[in-house]
Image (cartoon, rainbow, N blue to C red):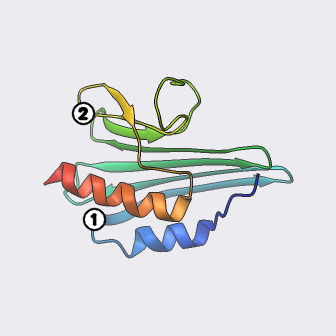
Amino acid sequence: MVVLFNFPSLVSILRNHELISKIEDIRVDEIAQRGFYKMKCRLIPSKYRLEIKFIKTHEEFIYAYRLYSTTTIVRWDNAPHYPGISTYPHHFHDLHGNVLESDLTGEAGKDLILVLSKIRKILV
C-alpha cells in the first residue's frame, strides 16, 4: 500500500487556513515501520478545537479528524468498524450521533482541505 503523506505540507495547510487561529500541539513519533502524527488546533471562534491523528504503516493508513468544544461535535475516521457503509472504511459521525458515508478517501492533503471546508459550514 502506497500512501502519499507529507506531514509538513499538512502543517502548512493548517497554518495558512483562516479557520485556524493556532496550532496548539504537534506530536510526531516515527520509527522504522510506523509513524504516529497528532495535531491539536484552536479554531475561530476560539471555543472550538480540531484534533487530527494519523497512523501510517506499510500496510495501512489510519486517520481521525475530530471537531470538539467541551465534547465531540463531529468526527471523520476510517476505523474499520462500519462495513455496511458504502464508503467503508471511511465514515462520518454527525452532530446527532449518526454514522454516515464520508467523502474522505485517505489522501491526507485533500481530506484536510475538505474537512476544514465542512467544519466552516458547521460553524456558520
Could you classify mark 1 by the number of other residues whose Cα lies within 10 Å: few (under 14), some (14-19), or many (20 or more)? some
Residue 24, horizontal then vertical, whole percent: 43, 58
| Residue at x-position 61% and y-position 65% | 7
Residue 9 disc label: none
State left or right for residue 36 relative to residue 41.
right
| Residue at x-position 27% and y-position 41% | 69
Q: How many marks?
A: 2
Of badges 2 and 1, the one in the foreground is 2
Callout 2: SS: loop
* Tag 1 residue: 19
Asked which quadrant contains residue 28, the reply is bottom right
State left or right for residue 57 relative to residue 22.
right
Looking at this view, name the residue that lies furthest to the front. Answer: 86
Instruction: Tell me the amino acid under the disc marked 1.
Output: Leu
Could you classify mark 2 by the number of other residues whose Cα lies within 10 Å: few (under 14), some (14-19), or many (20 or more)? few
| Residue at x-position 34% and y-position 71% | 17
Residue 65, horizontal then vertical, whole percent: 44, 46
Callout 1: SS: loop
* Tag 2 residue: 95
State left or right for residue 21 relative to residue 33.
left
Looking at this view, name the residue that lies furthest to the right. Answer: 32
Instruction: Tell me the amino acid under the disc marked 2.
Output: Leu
Q: Are marks 2 and 1 in contact (CB under 8 Å)?
A: no
